[in-house]
Amino acid sequence: MKLKTLSTAILLATVPMTGVFAAAMDRSGQSISAFLQPGNYFEAGISVLDPTVSGKEAGETTSRNTISDMADDYYFPSAALKFQVTNKFSFGLLYDQPFGAAAEYSGDNAFVSKLTDTVLPQSTLNGLVTSQVQSALATGSKQISDALSGSNTPLQSYDQLTDVQIVTAGVASQLIEAGLAPTNPAFAATLNAQVTGLITQAGGVDQAKQVILDGAQQKGNAALATQLAALGADQLGVGNTKVTVDTQNLTFLFGYQPTENWNIYAGPVYQTVKGNVSLRGQAYSIYNGYDAQIKETGDVGWLAGLAYQIPDIALKASLTYRSEIDHSTDVTETFSGGLNAIALLGGNPADITSSPGKTTITTPQSVNLDFQTGIMANTVAFANVRWVEWSKFGIRPYQFGKLSEEIGGLQSVNRPNGFDLVSYSDDQISATVGVGRKLSEQWAGNVSVGWDSGAGNPVSTLGPTEGYWNLGLGLQFSPTPATFIAGGVKYFWLGDAKSQTAAQYGENRIVGEFEENDAWGYGLKMGYRF
């Protein structure tokens, strides 16, 4: 049962779409199978994915609206050229698009801008006003006590004030606003009469205290709205949350075959990356209206591997390592007027926008293990296992990161060192197993089952799925011994996921839930031996 009997072309069709839809931003699967084909060889292919990813608001979103399909269709091409220069040396060029993202929200949900959006969560704004009200009442209580007693009394915190002191401070503030100064001889008597009257009218001290607090909160809300308008912080983003990330790899492979069985290979990898991100909607708080354009940049990494084959039994195994690749790029970042809201938190918007800097993006290292063997006449079994180190991946555009450090100290955020725009908690492990069979001299087919672990859950709102199971079918037609056309289709059961914003990463806080989603993948490949 030699490899030639099986027709080597059949083995190319067994995995026409290895990656297609995987954890985090993994796409192509970065196969080098074309380089391991005998002789001189060329192939070109394209894969298409049609996902459906929908869900509903959850967790810290104040509503529970439906989220319609937010995953965009996408396609990516691939190509490979391999020369067997001598019996012992080979050279190859591989092109693929290993990583990427394509998504856009629509409809009525927390990821689409609305006129009712607030620059910070309403609970945070309410907390700011409450803090100001409590501070004002504590200060007012001291000032009135000083004015009426003629002495300098210690400043008490709000928690130390009695209910009567709170009512007194609130009523005194109203009298002063009406024009009656504490130095007026009638002030003390008027204050005492109005405090007594309010307590009686409200039905007790507790009720009178609540009247004072409600009134102060309303005034504080109005004052805050005026302040936000003056800062321009009420001018938030318009449109939908969306993301696109594209990468390209050109791999140069040099192989050495000391014997018929062994192949040692290595080479440099040139990679480019570019992307665009827009954050919109209440879920992103102060980042509602943030845009980042990642300028295309390229840098170099490397790969190395080892392959072993026994042609007589159609056995072939390979282990390939790809290094991480560091990209230092300029990111054009823009914020809505909401950036000015950091002034309410004691920050300075100019410290963010006037501090340009480089952004580092490091695409992850990975390992691929591929195996195939003949199991009966005209039949091969195959398997692929892939590991990608997404747990160390993160994108933090420079100004995005500076703002995250400004707001990270808030109790509601609790991230004093800031946070990334996108990051993942786990590494990805994926596996595919299947069987390919030669049906006739010109036709061959295969069936496969795949699994992907995902890269953690909860996940980013920009890619809310956790792994998958899939079932694939492939078919190949070889009009001549030197040429073939292969196609395949895969159906994906996408893993349920909870989604969270960047500020929530590392905690169980979420803003969305995505369940019972799926995807269809399609692949087409043509090959030629020469």
Image: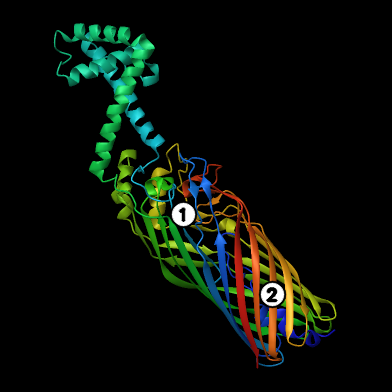
Q: Is residue 446 visible?
A: yes
Which corner quadrant holds the C terminus? bottom right
Mark earlier in primary sequence (2, 1): 1
Disc 2: CA contacts within 10 A as few (<14), some (14-19) or many (>=20):
many
Where does residue 325 sit, x and y in percent of width and height? 53, 68
Q: Residue at x 74, y 80 (%)?
A: 444
Disc 1: CA contacts within 10 A as few (<14), some (14-19) or many (>=20):
some
**Quarter of image, res 36:** bottom right
Could you tell whether 8 is left or right of 390 in the image?
Answer: right
Asked which secondary structure carries label 1, the reply is loop
Q: Is residue 162 visible?
A: no
Q: What amino acid does circle 2 point to?
A: Gly
Asked which secondary structure carries label 2, the reply is strand
Residue for badge 1? 421
Residue for badge 2? 474
Nearest to viewer (mark 2 / mark 1): 2
**Quarter of image, res 227:** top left
Which corner quadrant holds the N terminus? bottom right
Q: Nearer the viewer, residue 269 or 187?
A: 187
Report the Cα–Cα distance between label 2 and label 1: 38 Å
What colour scheme has been applied to the protein in the rendered image? rainbow
Where does residue 221 sit, x and y in percent of width and height? 30, 32
Q: Residue at x 40, y 43 (%)?
A: 407
Q: What amino acid does circle 1 point to?
A: Leu
